[in-house]
Amino acid sequence: MNGLAVIIPNYNGKKFLKVCFESLKKQSNILEVIIIDNGSDDGSVEFIKEYYPEYILIKNTENLGFSRAINQGIKKSSAEYCFLLNNDVELESNCTNNLINCIEKDKNIFSVASKMINFQDREKIDDAGDEYTVLGWTKKVGEGKSSKLYTHNREIFSACAGAAIYRRSIFDTIGYFDENFFAYMEDVDLGYRARIYGYKCVYCSNAVVYHHISATSGSRYNAFKIRLAARNNIYVPYKNMPWPQLLLNILFLLIGFMIKYLFFVRKGYGNDYINGLKEGLNSLDKIEKIRYNGRLINYLKIEWLLLKNTVKSIYF
């Protein structure tokens, strides 16, 4: 079915829902809105049922994590495109139309990232596309810079799943979000996997979303978020790099982990970061590595991109 399915995971986000939902009413091409509630106890479910009964509501009895909730929504949807959206955002009126126009320019585009702007300070960018480096770091391009910048569309490594459109049919080819991740880095893993299969991701400069930064996790830095992200930073290269590429990059990854550890020591979260790395290493048996299947050219392109992004993240 043509059109767009909006998929929103929610966990105790009632205070954000009205602004988000009302901005959806100003969009075009939306066939269905699917809310996946992860066991909220703040009245979110009752609010949705009373004021937005036209929306499809999936109720989980506990917090199953971002990845699993999103997968529930994707599998429930019937539209050609899935728009994955955080509950703590507000969309400009032409956002979804611009995203669809962008993805339809090339059948090899798997996902399109929106221009995410700080909700509280709309003069600053939150995210203008994600890049991944050989150090195992993810960089939110444009973070903290003027919202007047990044006005041109471009190819990026992966899209932030907090406000991005995906071509639904490709999930059946490359797989869905890895539920072992629970939350954080799952969108980078998916973008990496898409590149292995020869697909690409682009940034759409005129699809604007205003985002409450770290509203769900509670703060930019906290023990839960740092531990989980550190664990998932182990999963991403292990899962997506074939053994020769992993051996080639292992020194860079170790340097990246060490720098991050020293950074979090200064923030008071050194032990949480180390515990996350340990958890990742001790649970690799849960992670299914992507099969090489002769995609040498795609891996070479990815390696070059990782190196280029590393240089850009250091000097720019």
Image: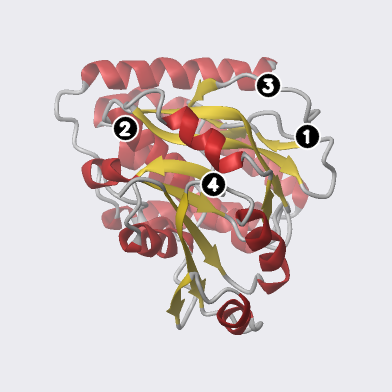
Pick whichever, 90 or 275, lies toward us: 90
Give the image location of residue 89, x and y in percent. 67, 54
Real-space Cα separation, disc 3 to disc 1, in angstroms: 15 Å
Real-space Cα separation, disc 2 to disc 3, in angstroms: 33 Å
Q: Quadrant of the C terminus?
A: top right
The answer to which of marks 4 and 3 sits earlier in the sequence is 4
The answer to which of marks 3 and 1 sits earlier in the sequence is 1
Give the image location of residue 289, x and y in percent. 25, 43
Proximity of marks 2 and 3: CB atoms separated by less than 8 Å: no
Please determine whether, in this image, residue 127 is positioned above or below residue 212: above
Residue type at mark 4: give it. Answer: Ser
The answer to which of marks 1 and 2 sits earlier in the sequence is 1
Q: Is residue 246 visible in the rendered structure shown here?
A: no
Give the image location of residue 66, x and y in percent. 48, 61
Please determine whether, in this image, residue 258 is positioned above or below residue 102: below
Please determine whether, in this image, residue 262 is positioned above or below residue 40: above
Residue type at mark 1: give it. Answer: Gly
Residue type at mark 3: give it. Answer: Thr
Residue type at mark 2: give it. Answer: Met
Residue highlighted by disc 4: 28
Proximity of marks 1 and 4: CB atoms separated by less than 8 Å: no
For the residue carrying disc 2, how many other residues have a C-alpha within 10 Å: few (<14), some (14-19), or many (20+)? Answer: many
For the residue carrying disc 4, how many other residues have a C-alpha within 10 Å: few (<14), some (14-19), or many (20+)? Answer: some
289 lies left or right of 141: left
Label at residue 144: 1
The answer to which of marks 4 and 2 sits earlier in the sequence is 4
Real-space Cα separation, disc 1 to disc 2, in angstroms: 31 Å
Residue highlighted by disc 3: 151
Residue highlighted by disc 2: 241
Which residue does the image show at 53% across and 77% down from the upper left?
53
The answer to which of marks 1 and 4 sits earlier in the sequence is 4
